[in-house]
Image (tube, rainbow, N blue to C red):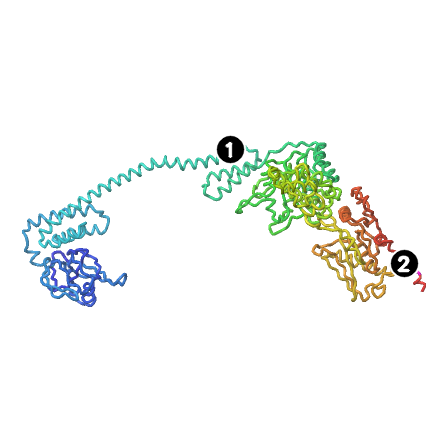
Amino acid sequence: MAAGSAIQIPSRLPLLLTHESVLLPGSTMRTSVDSPRNMQLVRSRLLKGTSLRSTIIGVIPNTSDPTSDCDDLPNLHRIGTAALAVQVVGSNWPKPHYTLLVTGLCRFQILQLLKEKPYPVAEVQQLDRLEQFTNGHKSEEELGELSEQFYKYAVQLVEMLDMSVPAVAKLRRLLDNLPREALPDILTSIIRTTNQEKLQILDAVRLEERFKMTIPLLVRQIEGLKLLQKTRKSKQDDDKRVVAIRPSRRIPHGSITEDEEEEEDHDDVVMLEKKIRTSSMSEQALKVCLKEIKRLKKMPQSMPEYALTRNYLELMIELPWNKSTKDRLEIRAARIVLDNDHYAMEKLKKRVLEYLAVRQLKNNLKGPILCFVGPPGVGKTSVGRSIAKTLGREFHRIALGGVCDQSDIRGHRRTYVGSMPGRIINGLKTVGVNNPVFLLDEVDKLAKSLQGDPAAALLEVLDPEQNHSFTDHYLNVAFDLSQVLFIATANTTATIPPALLDRMEVIQVPGYTQEEKIEIAHRHLIPKQLELHGLTPQQIQIPQGTTLGIITRYTREAGVRALDRKLGAICRAVAVKVAEGQHKEAKPDRAEVGEGEDCKEHVTEDAKPESISDTADLALPPEMPILIDFHALKDILGPPMYDMEVSERLNQPGVAIGLAWTPLGGEIMFVEASRMDGEGQLTLTGQLGDVMKESAHLAISWLRSNAKRYQLTNASGSFDLLDNTDIHLHFPAGAVTKDGPSAGVTIVTCLASLFSGRLVCSDVAMTGEITLRGLVLPVGGIKDKVLAAHRAGLKRIIIPQRNEKDLEEIAAHVRQELSFVLAARLEEVLNAAFDGGFAARASLEHLNSKL
Ligand code: ADP
């Protein structure tokens, strides 16, 4: 389409009917083709045609073509645009259609419709871009003026556009290069016009008319653009102004909120810093804290580390670096407190008072750590509490049972997620002073694991030479623990790591005798339980006989914890009765009104007010205390758990009672033996340790070697006890592992009973290690063992002679109730264990030798 070039279109054109848009010569348009006629045209003319001529079609605007094939051809606009189909794109979605890209060439008018189906074809007459038109039309001047005017407007319009856009720059160049007559059509298709206006331009076949019609459109566009630019400019100005204003507005505004927040944080941090500076922390700690504060100031609050650092600093401030309670140590007062809080345990109280006295005189705490070792429930913890009370110090208990991670003691490094200080530092934070009494409970139950040995960490804590600069991993600065009074408790020293044990002074706290337990119950436990349950002594009475019943038939322990629990259970039951009684009392009018039921109840109650065993007794008069008798005990606690079974079990040969010591206190232990035909095998059952197995072998060897002397024979009457005989020794309570040499004498006695066929005395218990030569060697835990025998109601106790000194520890009244046999040799043991002694047949031996 060179400038001034003429076009020659075919005289017959297939017609494409468009509805939505108007194609003007010189412009390009994309149009969708989906009506059957148009589709047919595209298929048979454009897709099959091979020549350039076949791609020229006539586009008739403003014609809505019905979608149905059979419909008649609508009225056609008379003037159309001959166009070159530049591109055809087919698609099946959403329905079959083509998209045509067509470029307008020139106007034509339909002379005659040649055919309608399958698509319309018409004989046409070309209306512009013809040789004769370009040359022989209106006077040059008139047109020149018009075209010049048009050109100016066109240039003005284009220049109002953004020239940096390549298409605009190209358009600007085209304005100069294109023939003026082509401009109205091109510009009309570019500027914003309605289809109707475009149709008018299309219909304006005369060039002059076309120019005249287009100029107002151009002017309108220019005005529109001007307006647009004006508003855009003012908007831009506004924008600029807004931008200009906003910073000036936003900054103060923004700074108010954000700065406020920041300032708040800052204030917070400043406050924190102030607190740090005014706190009495050590210089080293202060340095670390100030460094952390510096880091905190630079840190955005959203950082996870911010919270961590803050927590750390808050802990540092909270720790009692220099805060302590004043010790008010007065030994006489301490003695009173200890005596008031605890019955018995004289040895322990004496040692504690000595310890405190030394503290008072020396005025420092350097010295061994006290470690109370004894069965559970004997008052180790509560003595610790009393010590704190006498000193006027804070008390904190740190349970170490099952602790297996050294960071439990020493804290986690702060690099760990969820890191926290150890129990020592935590305890200090809790009590808020640096000189509390820390009770390290159950040091014997510390465990080792991959996470390190907590006992090793405790060493540092407990060593007075080191603990003034104890460094918790979390704090990472030294904290002085030298003012803390540590007391440890344990059930046994056997499992306390030796290094730790070395730092401590062990004070044994043995179990209580029945009498002591009764006293403890009546002086301490019952009043405490009454208070706990809101009862008064006027409401409940527990006679000593009942307490003894609870101790012997419902508990079997060295301490008083189970006793305490049982008393609690009794108080609960009584509390229900009392509450119910009060409830009934609150509505006495019912009885007065004549509800015979209630009256009857009162009468029956009066007959038997002292027991609550009768569950119908609901409304006791308040002034009548509920008496806990054996019936009531049975009602509340159920049938007795432990019966006196000793004599029952000793009614056949081959049973003896030994005494054992466990971390839970002393216990009596039945040793049973039986023999059967066999090959001299010894079977041992009951979870025994090696030492105990050895004791069994020793016992058998000694008996075999002394069989003749004591006339011990196997089933066939032979003095070779193991000839054709198997022996089975059983130590009941097989679930508990037993070890130790102290069962030696019991095994010998038990086997002597078996082979002699005599019964062991039913009230004898014994303990002692044996040797092959028949000596009885001393053993440990005598006090606990004796108490256990006493609890079990045994009367005679055989102990090694060299344990005589241990008897002094036993309360006099217990000693009085028992008879002790101090044995140095096994012969003495056997003599004491059997009624009428266990005589050796020296004469027989003599006789035999004669024979
Ligand atoms: P432990 O620490 O030895 O396991 P506790 O100190 O917890 O035992 O004592 C258990 C309960 O028994 C506490 O209520 C305690 O007051 C009480 N108790 C133990 N021994 C005595 C005693 N000699 N005098 C008074 N109460 C005692």
817 or 333: nearer the viewer? 817
Q: Quadrant of ligand 1?
A: top right
Residue 371 point in image, percent of width and height? 70, 42
Q: CA distance from mark 2 to mark 1?
A: 94 Å
Q: Mark 1: which secondary structure?
A: helix
Q: Is residue 260 found left or right of 219 in the rendered image?
A: right
Residue 75 point in image, percent of width and height? 13, 59
Instruction: Point out the frontmost of discs 2 and 1.
Output: 2
Residue type at mark 2: give it. Answer: Arg
Q: Which residues are magenta?
A: 840-846
700 or 186: nearer the viewer? 700
**Figure quadrant of the C terminus:** bottom right
In this rendering, the count of numbered labels is 2
**Figure quadrant of the N terminus:** bottom left
The residue to which callout 1 is attached is: 274
Q: Mark 2: which secondary structure?
A: loop
Q: Is residue 421 magenta?
A: no
- Residue 850's label in the rendered image is none
Q: Is residue 94 found left or right of 743 in the rendered image?
A: left
Q: Which residue is at a point 24% across and 42% down the rendered structure image?
A: 232
Q: Is residue 781 found left or right of 583 in the rendered image?
A: right
Residue 269 point in image, percent of width and height? 48, 36
The residue to which callout 2 is attached is: 841
The vertical placement of 645 against 461, above or below, is below
Residue 724 found in image quarter: bottom right
